[in-house]
Amino acid sequence: MHPVRWFLAVLLVVGASELCCAGPLHAQCKVEWYFGIPCQVVYESLVSQIKKWRTMAGCTMGGQRCLYKLQSASVHFIAAKHTTPFKKYVDDINFRWSPITSSLAVMFR
């Protein structure tokens, strides 16, 4: 077979495999919570917990309560990363919230 035809055949196979396997190669989710407590309390609790779980201490016996890293925190947004302890996959975690009267709505992605 002519080299150009080999190249086109390989290109076609690679292109077809990309189409059938398109999409994210990771889990995605979105959750909404509604709290009846002040926004500041939720904000401080989330930031505090992320900081507590930054070391390997919570990874014993296959646990995942470890290797969290706070990326940024502001009045309406928290961004963090979690690295799985054994495979070293990195997950992005984002919290957004907005006050609803006297309670709080939090969206987690």
Image (cartoon, rainbow, N blue to C red):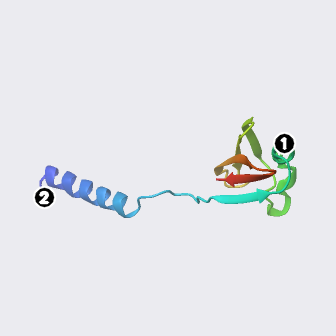
Dot 2 falls on a residue whose secondary structure is: loop
Give how far across and how far down residue 22 sits, in percent.
41, 59
Q: Tell me: residue 76, above or below residue 16.
A: above
Q: Residue at x 56, y 57 (%)?
A: 26
Pick whichever, 1 or 40, lies toward us: 40
The residues tagged by marks 1 and 2 sit, at their Cα atoms, a distance apart of 69 Å
Q: Give the amino acid type for the residue marked by disc 2 in the picture.
A: Met
Q: Tell me: residue 90, above or below residue 75.
A: below
Q: Residue at x 79, y 62 (%)?
A: 62
Q: Tell me: residue 1, above or below residue 72.
A: below
Dot 1 falls on a residue whose secondary structure is: helix
Q: Which residue is mark 1?
A: 40
Q: Residue furthest left?
A: 2
Q: Residues within 10 Å of mark 2 (few under 14, many from 20)?
A: few
Position of 49 with respect to 99 (left or right) is right
Any part of residue 106 in sight: yes
Q: Residue at x 70, y 49 (%)?
A: 83
Q: Which residue is mark 2?
A: 1
Q: Residue furthest front?
A: 101
**Mark 1–mark 2 CB contact (< 8 Å):** no
Give how far across and how far down residue 107 sits, in percent.
68, 53
Give how far across and how far down residue 48 sits, in percent.
86, 43
The mark that comes first in sequence, 1 or 2, is 2
Quadrant the N terminus occupies: bottom left
Q: Residue at x 69, y 59 (%)?
A: 32
Pick whichever, 63 or 38, lies toward us: 38
Q: How many marks?
A: 2
Q: Give the amino acid type for the residue marked by disc 1 in the picture.
A: Gln
Mark on residue 80?
none
